[in-house]
Image (cartoon, helix red, strand yellow):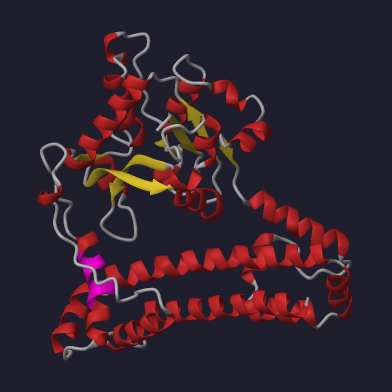
Amino acid sequence: MREIHLVFASEGKGVASSFGHVSVRFLVCPDVSSSLLDCRKNLLNHIFLGYVARIDGMEMDLLKGLVGGYDAHLFGSTFREVFRSNTVLADRDVYSLPLNLSENEIIQIVRDLSEIHWAYRGNYRFITANCATLLQDLLNQALGLEEEEETELDFLRPDSLFSALRDSKLARGDVFASLALAEQQGYFFPRNRIYYQQALDYLQSNIADYPFYSLDEYGQTRASARLIALLSDDAIYKAFQRNERLVEAQRLLEERWLMLLWFESFQQVVSIIVELNLIQLLEVKIAQMSDGEDKQLLLQCYMQPLRQISREVERFNGIPSVSQLPEYIFDKRRSCHSQEAQQRVFDVINSALVSDNSLIKKLKGLEHELAQALDNIETLERFF
């Protein structure tokens, strides 16, 4: 690992994210002899760590968040997860600020974070014990800043911490002098909405009667109606035939809504798990099932992961040995991701639920839209 960055995601729509979010980014290199440029390009292996509240439900209780009713824990993510969840799904800009650290300081921060991951347990408070305050406590200790009042970091808001570090000698804030250059060099990741807006603008400027006026209107139109509106108009059809870039722009808009629909479906599944007590329902269903492939698929692909994420996080006094960790039994011969396996498990889960439940009906509606959006993309590729 060659560098550590402070990562700031700009303000989100929710109350808890109104001042942004901070975390740290570990630039993991392909190998020991890699150049710094190679390390920066090794994006898929970069690790992000940040403090979050462990919310026990679909909706955040603001009062509970203010007084400290949620567990705080260190949450790890990959670059792909951070990029997708912020710039694509949440419409937020991401700034990656390189810190001026010696090799020993990098080692110390990694060790401290490793111990925190296994041993820390505390309350998350949105104002006084949040992602910014908890992270800067670590930096103050690891870098010896608490010994000097002038350099000690003491900010309650993530955006304030980011601004202070950006303008200090502790970081290389000059990388943001040009955001265009910062984007090329991997320090700035703008919200993706601007690229989809460019695609829409290109379609509108090259097709006189293009039927959609805004990104929001596009998404609010049923997927089947979008395809009919495009292919039933001879002028649009001929424009697509003449200009391949128009087809690419159209496919880009459809792919954006495919991702947003997938995320909404995921949230709906979580709602079903929480509100319908799905774990308890499936425990009863499994007890009634005879041994067989369906039962094993349900246990491995759903029940074991659900049990793992729903139970209280185990803490250790320092970094544990492998023998201290709970064993997770996983049969590699059984694939949870094949279409056949997913369909078989879905049928079992569906049989355990009340079919006329509003949450189930909404999920089925989202699944229908997802299937139609996929069909729209395949149709565009097949016709043009």
Residue 123 drawn in magenta: no
Q: Is residue 234 above or below residue 215?
A: below
Residue shown at the point (27%, 10%) measured from the top left: 147
Please state the extent of the stretch shown in magenta in the rendering.
Answer: 299-307
The residue nearer to you, when weighing 256 against 264, is 256
Residue for point 50% across, 76% down:
366
- Residue 103 coordinates in the image, percent (x, y): 37, 21
Magenta stretch prevailing secondary structure: helix
Examine the rendered structure and indicate whether residue 201 appears above or below residue 131.
Answer: below
What percent of the width, then of the height, locates residue 18? 46, 41
Q: In the rendered view, does 103 fall on the left or right side of 310?
A: right
Q: Position of residue 93 (x, y in %)?
A: 56, 42
* Residue found at the very far front of the displayed protein: 33
Find residue 224 and report its image quarter.
bottom right
Quarter the N terminus occupies: top left
> At 62% across and 80% down in the image, what residue appears?
375
Asked if residue 191 shows in the view, the reply is yes
Quadrant hosting residue 212: bottom right
**Quadrant hosting residue 154:** top left
